[in-house]
Image (spheres, grey):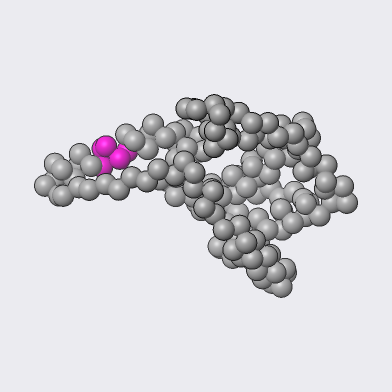
């Protein structure tokens, strides 16, 4: 089941969650869904000492079908999120015409505007290079299962 929307369609947050969960749920409920999970994992050197395993990052080489399927899900979800104004304009990095360089320019412009207006400016910058190493995936899976259960109860 693929979901497409026109420009006249608007959703509430609850409807948006329902649409997204239904699309993902139906996509991964195929009988042969294991084809989507087959990949070859390679280690790619990042920086510094080549003898330390922490200086390598894993990449997945996916079959063409999986990559195409991933791209289709990305485009469908991205279209839905942008057409319903779900994403903040300050989200940079993965959106078209919103690179991290634009984020830096926006930050500098906002700071300069505040300084010109005699407002005190401060900044807190966090290095999130290894942020995913700290994620508790058990909590995420429990929340995801709860959300899927709630959406299925509604429909």
| Region rendered in magenta | 106-110
Dividing the picture into quarters, in which one does residue 116 lie? top left
* Residue 151 visible in this rendered orientation of the protein: no
Residue 33 magenta-drawn?
no
At horizontal 27% and vertical 37% (from top left) the residue drawn is 108
Q: Is residue 86 left or right of residue 33?
A: left
Dividing the picture into quarters, in which one does residue 18 lie? bottom right
Magenta span dominant secondary structure: helix
In the displayed structure, 150 sits above or below 57; it is: below
Q: Is residue 5 left or right of residue 50?
A: right
Instruction: Give the x, y percent position of residue 63.
Output: 77, 32
At horizontal 60% and vertical 28% (from top left) the residue drawn is 44
At horizontal 50% and vertical 28% (from top left) the residue drawn is 49
Q: Residue furthest front?
A: 51
Q: Is residue 137 left or right of residue 68?
A: left
At horizontal 65% and vertical 68% (from top left) the residue drawn is 146
Q: Nearer the viewer, residue 103 or 11?
A: 103
Q: Nearer the viewer, residue 152 or 12?
A: 152
């Amino acid at each position: 089941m693929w979901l497409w929307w026109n420009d006249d369609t608007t959703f509430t947050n609850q409807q948006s969650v329902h649409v997204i969960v239904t699309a993902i749920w139906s996509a991964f409920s195929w009988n042969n869904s294991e084809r989507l999970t087959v990949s070859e994992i390679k280690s790619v050197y990042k920086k510094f000492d080549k003898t330390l395993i922490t200086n390598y990052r894993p990449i997945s080489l996916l079959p063409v079908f999986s990559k195409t399927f991933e791209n289709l899900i990305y485009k469908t979800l991205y279209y839905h999120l942008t057409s319903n104004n779900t994403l903040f304009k300050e989200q940079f990095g993965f959106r078209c015409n919103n690179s991290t360089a634009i984020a830096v320019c926006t930050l500098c412009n906002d700071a300069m505007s505040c300084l010109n207006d005699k407002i005190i400016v401060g900044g807190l910058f966090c290095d999130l290079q290894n942020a995913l190493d700290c994620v508790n995936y058990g909590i995420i899976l429990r929340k995801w299962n709860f959300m899927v259960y709630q959406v299925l109860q509604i429909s």
